Amino acid sequence: MLNFLQFLGQHGNLLISSSLFLSVIVIFVVVLIRPSGKRKLILPPSPSKLPIIGNLHNIGRYPHRSLHVLAQRFGPLMLLRFGNCPVLVVSSADAAREIKKTHDLTFINGPKVSATQKLLYDYKDVSTAPYGEYWRQMRSICVLNLLSNKRVQSYRAIREEETVLAMEHIKRSCSSGLPVNLSELFPAITNNVICRIALGTKYSEDADRFKKLLNDFVELLGTTNIGDYLPWLAWVSHVNGFNAKADRVAKEFDEFLDGVIEEHMNRQNKHVNDQKDFVDVLLEIQRENAVGFPIETTSIKALILDMFAAGTDTTYTVMEWAMTELLRNPKAMKEIQNEVRKVYGGKSSISEDDLHNMHYLKAVIKETLRLHPPIPLLLPRICSKDVKIQGYDIMEGTQVFINAWAIGRDPSSWEKPEEFLPDRFLNSSIDFKGHHFELIPFGSGRRICPGIQLAMQLNEVFLANLVHKFDWSLPGGANDKDLDMTESFGLTIHKSSPLIATANQCSF
């Protein structure tokens, strides 16, 4: 016993140290092997990231193309980082279906973006307003008073009148031997139709100004502003001119819309019910408080801008790419002309009554939308709560981009996806109205674009008349394969260079 106490006295500190060390080891092992209260997340595949900026360097000038290339390596669900913000990129019909149908409410809202806030009256328009009562009321106003089937049909005379005027313009160019700048003609006719429907009059004298404004508008909305993802770099937008350009475009549109509203208020009492345009209806709803809560003038301007900008830009880009593809594919051009001329060749012009049996015409438009969706990444959405998509954990606050352009070229959904083949739709039930996720150029779910019918009616009647009345070729005998297919930059994708073609009038 004495020997033991002597040993303890001599080596006690060592024993205590050893015991403490062993205790720490035991505790560490227990903590390591004990099940954690948190489940390990299963995240989608990701490309490598750079410090601070994450994957912002992967976007490129044409984000839909850059992200498509990445998705071919990392899969149809891919997680990126834009600064500190997680970003989910969706590139397959199945994944899009799960987000836009199964979990539509989880992804119902869009992120807060500086350009959208500046240009769209602090999210007062239908496309960006938060989901809720305000959004429902504003969307209902637009649909009932402008975009319903009954309303769209009531504008038929306007569409047909403007089509006839455009054909006369082409005829004059044809007679003088001059080529036609279709990239100028398409926005002009679309602008005239939308202005007459929504604003009550044409603004032909301002056509060039509107085209420039619209181009700047969609370019700003399609630009990735680094300050939205790295707030401490927001100063860059001042240096590179982004903020100044956004302020200028917002100011010019606001001044134009103030003038429209003032003009309508001055002549409001002169209208009878069947002569009211969309602006008159909005002002009447505001005056009578018809939706149960006050509608501010900024809300009216936001709705007008929605109808004017979105209705013009996304409509004429379909015409532009359809004619571009037809000029590049003489066989398809011949097929659509044969269809139109065989049945309706004796008529002076094609009316909307004649469109129902033009199956190849409709197939051409579907194929154009497959290859050239007007907004290739659709409108971004944000995840409102943690959710599982195709086995992966998607966290609250994740931004979501659905690459409709990549989905339209997915070889698992389409045979020869890079080729323009309208025939693929002749015996197919696939449409573009949000039910078939292989083709969602206008989105899907609760926030699908409400103006599809209005846009398609104009596209169909105008394209039918173009190919019915004229034979088209490229100027100077240029080869169809030399046609420049470079895209513009922005939210909506147009041809970068003007589409100029020669028209030869046909006699029947």
Image (cartoon, helix red, strand yellow):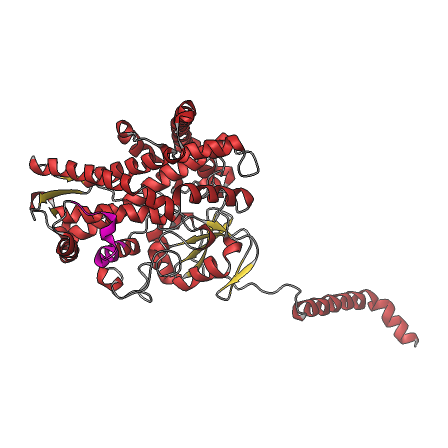
Left or right? Give the position of 311 relative to 32. Answer: left
For the N terminus, the quadrant is bottom right
Which residue is nearer to you in this view: 232 or 427?
Answer: 427
Measured from the top left, where is residue 383 in percent x and y? Answer: 52, 53
Which residue is nearer to you in this view: 350 or 443?
Answer: 350
Magenta range: 349-365
Which residue is nearer to you in this view: 234 or 492?
Answer: 492
Residue drawn at (33%, 65%), measured in percent from left and top? 413
- Let me know if residue 473 appears in the view: no
Q: Is residue 334 above or below residue 134?
A: below
User: Which quadrant of the structure image shows residue 407?
Assistant: bottom left
Residue drawn at (34%, 32%), measured in percent from left and top? 200
- Let me know if residue 98 appears in the view: yes
Left or right? Give the position of 184 relative to 273. Answer: left
User: Which quadrant of the structure image shows residue 371?
Assistant: bottom left
Measured from the top left, where is residue 498 in percent x and y? Answer: 20, 40
The main secondary structure of the magenta stretch is: helix
Magenta region includes residue 354: yes
User: Which quadrant of the structure image shows residue 273?
Assistant: top left
Q: Which residue reaches farthest bottom? A: 1
Measured from the top left, where is residue 66 in percent x and y? Answer: 34, 52
Magenta region includes residue 475: no
